[in-house]
Image: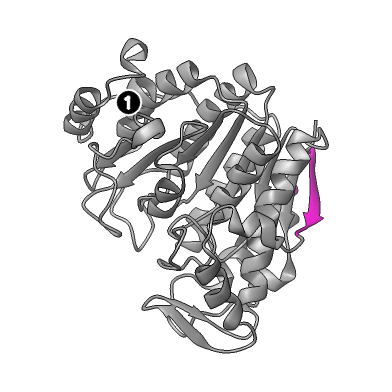
Amino acid sequence: MTTLLLTHPTCLDHHPGAGHPERAERLGTILSVLRGEPVAVTAWEDARPVDDAALRRVHSAALVEQVLSARGRHDALDPDTATSPRSVDAALLAAGAAVQAVDAVLDGRAENAFALVRPPGHHATPTRAMGFCFFNNLAIGAAHAVSRGIARVLVVDWDVHHGNGTQDAFYARRDVLFMSTHQYPFYPGSGDVTETGAGDGAGFTVNAPLPAGCDDADYAAVFAEVLLPIAEAFRPELVMVSAGFDAHRDDPLGGMELTTEGFTALCGAVREVARRHAAGKMVLCLEGGYDLDALAQSVRGCVSVLAGGGAPPLRGRAGRSAVTLRRMKEALGAPWKGAL
């Protein structure tokens, strides 16, 4: 089965301002690496713009109208979220790529897919563009999957920042299980272990707020001891990943110590969950990552894993993550008590 890679040249035309870390070179370097040394069993497809119905499954009419009104001009949607003339077109394509990726794996055109697009999405809430994000690409894709009859979507967010927008979109629902590993305290300030969902979604938000300095072994321990057992108990029909790479030790914005091999190991572990429960159906959406080489090589490592390559094993050891692990186990009751 093919690994589908989705992108579009317009995603390089979003320019949020001089010196902004979310620059076009991020995606350009990824594409250069993947096209210069192609990974076997991968295929490319141009992204198509998202349709209005898919946008409004996640976002309010007011937010959609606010973003669309900035089309073709320079505007500021948030202090760190600015548009240039092609930015809104790029955002529509980025969200569309997530929907397209979901359709490709659900329809059997690909086993898995990676939306290599920008602007990123996981900070965009149902009502607010923020944190470099206009629309929440992954959340739009997950909601689209549910609209197609998928009963259980697992979302894993390993970006260094908490995916507050994705959490907000599904906080009171149990058809989407949201898991996030992130540096804490850090932008945007959310993501404590006590944030576990509400109403029907109680227990279906799982946060791993980690102190700065956590490394491959810390992340492996969190996944092995808490996140993967819960994922197994959930038995997802589709697995989606907010694939940010700013927890890399070389990243200028984050304070974590993950390596390229560490990201590859995480991708391999999540892929195995998808293979056991979802016939391999897995979609990654690009989020953060601001050191160009670390970003591109980590993406390539994940693409190789998606395409059937081997992944290093998780080698867990709770060092800096020990307190977080204890707090997570204390905070997580029903429905996961028996899984931990």
Please, is residue 35 above or below residue 69 in the view? above
User: Which residue is located at x 36 percent, y 78 percent?
Assistant: 79
- Residue type at mark 1? Ala
Q: How is the image coloured?
A: one colour
Q: Residue furthest top?
A: 338
The percent coordinates of residue 45 (x first, y second) are 80, 54
The percent coordinates of residue 178 (x first, y second) are 44, 37
Please, is residue 10 above or below residue 33 in the view? below
The part of the image, by quadrant, that contains residue 308 is top right
Q: Is residue 115 left or right of residue 186?
A: right
User: Which residue is located at x 28 percent, y 54 percent?
Assistant: 255
Q: Is residue 9 left or right of residue 118?
A: right
The percent coordinates of residue 296 (x first, y second) are 57, 55
Task: Say if residue 265 shows up in the picture.
Answer: yes
User: Which residue is located at x 59 percent, y 89 percent?
Assistant: 73
Mark 1 lies on residue: 221
Q: Is residue 206 left or right of residue 148?
A: left
Q: Secondary structure at mark 1?
A: helix
The percent coordinates of residue 11 (x first, y second) are 66, 69
User: Which residue is located at x 46 percent, y 51 percent?
Assistant: 245
- In reply to whether residue 41 is colored magenta, the answer given is yes
- In reply to whether residue 149 is colored magenta, the answer given is no
- Quarter of the image with the C terminus is top left
The part of the chain drawn in magenta is 38-47
